[in-house]
Image (spheres, grey):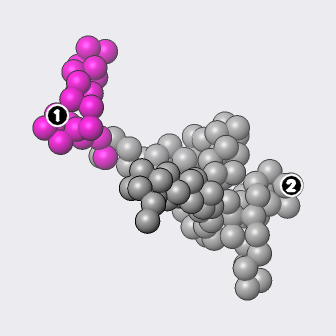
Amino acid sequence: MKPDHLNTKSMQNKEKNEVVRVSVSEAARLFGVNPQTIRRAIKDQEITYIVVAGRYKVNFESLVKWSQSKTTVKNKLDSRGIGQYIDKWKISNTLYSPRKNASDEENDT
C-alpha cells in the first residue's frame, strides 16, 4: 500500500488534469451573453471546445480567459452573468469566514 500523502498527491494531480466543459447555452447563461456570442467565439477560435454527440462542449477555463479579455463580455458577466451574485456570496460572519480578518479588511477600505 502507498502512504497516504502519495495517494493525496495522486488525487490532486488527477483533479488538475480534469477539464470542466459546459454547453453553449450554459456558457451564455453563466457569462450573461447571447448564445450567438459564444458560437461566434468558437468560430473565431477564441475559446477551445470539443464536439460531443454533435454539440459543442466549451472549455470553461478558456471561457474565463476569453471573457476577461473582452470588455463588453466582462461587463455583462458582472451585470447579467454569474458576477451579479458575488456580493450575496460574501461571508460577513467572521466565525464562518475562511479568512478571519476578511471583514476587517473590508471595513478598513
Residue located 77% across and 75% down the image: 51
Q: Tell me where residue 13 sits by quadrant.
A: bottom right
- Number of dots carrying numbers: 2
Q: Which amino acid, by three-letter code, is at mark 2?
A: Asp
| Crowd class of label 2 (few under 14; some 14 to 19; many from 20; radius 10 Å) | few
Left or right: residue 87 versus residue 75 is left
SS class of the residue under badge 1?
loop
Closer-to-camera residue (85/93): 93
* Res 70 seen here: yes
Left or right: residue 26 versus residue 42 is left
Magenta stretch prevailing secondary structure: loop
Left or right: residue 46 versus residue 35 is right
Q: Is residue 20 above or below residue 73?
A: below
- 105 falls in the magenta region: yes
The spot of residue 96 in percent (x, y) is 18, 42
The spot of residue 31 in percent (x, y) is 57, 54
Residue located 27% across and 27% down the image: 102
Residue located 31% across and 46% down the image: 89
Residue segment shown in magenta: 89-109
Closer-to-camera residue (26/50): 50
Point out which mark residue 94 bears: 1
Residue located 63% across and 70% down the image: 23
SS class of the residue under badge 2?
loop
Point out which mark residue 44 bears: 2
Farthest residue to the right: give it: 44
Q: Quadrant of the N terminus?
A: bottom left
Closer-to-camera residue (82/72): 82
- 98 falls in the magenta region: yes
* Res 32 seen here: no
Measured Cα–Cα span from mark 2 to mark 1: 45 Å
Q: Tell me where residue 68 sits by quadrant.
A: top right
The answer to which of marks 2 and 1 sits earlier in the sequence is: 2
